[in-house]
Image: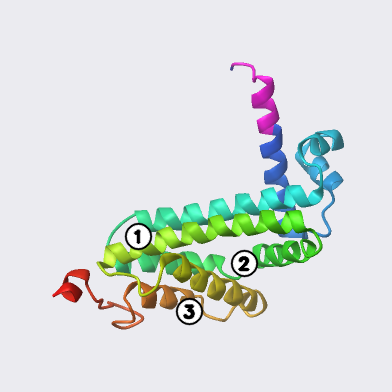
Amino acid sequence: MARLTRTESQARTRGDLIATARDLFLTEGYAKTSLERVAEAAGYSKGAVYSNFRTKKELGLEVLELIHTTKFDEVRDLIAAGGSLDDQLARFQEWAEHTVGDIGWTLLEFEFATVTRDDPELQAALRSSLGLVRGAVAAQLQTLADTAGIALPLPAQDAATAVLSLGIGLGMQRAIDPALPARLVTDAVRLLVTAGEGPLLGNAGSTRRDSAAE
C-alpha cells in the first residue's frame, strides 16, 4: 500500500475526527462532549484536534454538515431509484419513519442552534448550511413533481421551506412521542407534488401539465 502524502494524512485525520465527533454528539450530546473526549475516542492527540478545528463550535458545524449530506444523499438515492410517484413516496415514507424524530439528531440540531445565538459568525455559517439543505430538498421536490408530470403549486424553494418546517417540528414532537406518525411529512410532500389532487395514501391522482394546458 502506497504511503499517504501529508495532505492525504491530514484529510484522513480530519475525517476521522468529524466522524467520531458525530457519533459522540449523537449518543452523548453536544454539550457533554469535549474536544478532549473526541481526540481520545478517535485515537488522536488533543493537538490533532486543535490543529484542525479552532473551536468546538467549528467542529459541531462540520458534524451537522456531514449529517445533512448523509441524510439527503439517502433521500436522493431513494427518489432516484425510480418507479411511480407512489413507489418513490413509499420509499421516502419508510426512510421518514426511521429518521424523522431520531432523538440524537433532533437534540443535536436543537443544542447547536442554541449555542449559535450569541455568535453572529456561526449563525451566518449555519444559515448558509440550511440554505444548502433547502436547495437539496427543493431539487428533490422538483424531481417528484416531474415524475408526477405536474407543476408545483408554489416555487420549489418555498415548497422546500414548508416541508422542512413541518419535518423539523414533527421531528421534535416525535423525539418526545415516537407514536406520532411520520407519514404527515409524506402526506405534505404528496399534496405539494400532486397540487392537492387525489388521496393522500394509495394511488394519488394528479393534475398533469398536458391536461392543464388543454
In this rendering, which labeled residue sits more in front, label 3 or label 1? 1
Q: Which residue is mark 2?
A: 102
Q: Which residue is mark 1?
A: 143
In this rendering, which labeled residue sits more in front, label 2 or label 1? 1
Residue 161 % position (x, y):
52, 69
Residue 21 % position (x, y):
73, 48
In this rendering, which labeled residue sits more in front, label 3 or label 2? 3
Q: Callout 3, which amino acid? A: Leu
**Image mark count:** 3
Q: In the picture shown, does residue 35 fall above or below 182?
A: above
Give how far apart the Cα atoms at labels 3 and 1 are.
Answer: 20 Å
In the image, 15 versus 148, the foreground residue is 148
CB atoms of marks 3 and 1 within 8 Å:
no
Give how far apart the Cα atoms at labels 3 and 2 are.
Answer: 16 Å
Q: Please tell me whether mark 3 sits on a helix, a strand or a loop.
A: helix
Label 1: how many residues lie within 10 Å, few (<14), some (14-19) or many (20+)? some
Over which residues does the magenta segment extend? 2-12
Residue 199 % position (x, y):
31, 83
Q: Please tell me whether mark 1 sits on a helix, a strand or a loop.
A: helix
**Residue 159 is covered by the magenta coloring:** no
Q: Earlier in the sequence, mark 3 or mark 2?
A: 2
Q: Callout 1, which amino acid? A: Thr
Residue 209 % position (x, y):
22, 70
Q: Earlier in the sequence, mark 3 or mark 1?
A: 1
Q: In the picture shown, does residue 10 fall above or below 102?
A: above
Q: Callout 2, which amino acid? A: Asp
Q: Which residue is mark 3?
A: 184
